[in-house]
Image (cartoon, helix red, strand yellow):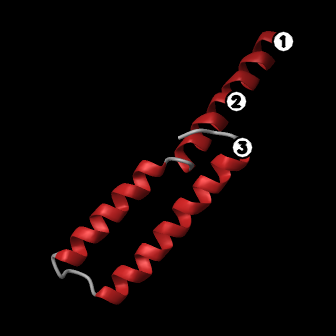
Amino acid sequence: MFIIDDFLIWMAEKLRDMAYQEITDESKLKEELLKLRTLYELDEISEEEYQKKEDEILRRLEAIREEKARTGIKK
């Protein structure tokens, strides 16, 4: 019985760690910024739409960085 409990706890911790890594991954937001910039430069979106989406992405990026600083996580 304890083996199953230990396994379930281990699995839950692994899933938690993977989810945390996923939501604090800056590379996806940086990729979004690059794609957004490309769309703007190709005149596929307006400057207003570009600014709005860029601000949103930058806020999310800042929130991730603040969370990492708060928890002491590097990169």
Q: In front: mark 1 or mark 3?
A: 3
Q: Report if the CB atoms under discs 1 and 3 are less than 8 Å apart.
A: no
Q: Does residue 6 appear left or right of residue 39 in this picture?
A: right
Check disc 3 and report its element: helix, strand or loop. helix
Q: Residue 74 at x, y = what percent?
A: 58, 38
Furthest residue in direction left, as rendered: 42
Numbered circle sitting on residue 2: 1
Q: How far apart are marks 2 and 3 (CA)?
A: 17 Å
Please indicate, yes or no, whether residue 1 appears anywhere in the rendered image.
no
Residue at 41% x, 74% y is 54
Q: Distance between the residues labelled 1 and 2?
A: 16 Å
Q: Taking 12 as reference, is 52 above or below it?
A: below
Q: Mark 2 points at which residue?
A: 13
Q: Mark 3 points at which residue?
A: 71
Q: Taking 56 as reference, is 64 above or below it?
A: above
Q: In front: mark 1 or mark 2?
A: 2
Check disc 1 and report its element: helix, strand or loop. helix
Q: Distance between the residues labelled 1 and 3?
A: 31 Å
Q: Does residue 6 appear left or right of residue 63 in this picture?
A: right
Q: Does residue 27 appear left or right of residue 41 in this picture?
A: right
Q: Taking 42 as reference, is 74 above or below it?
A: above
Amino acid at pointer 2: Glu
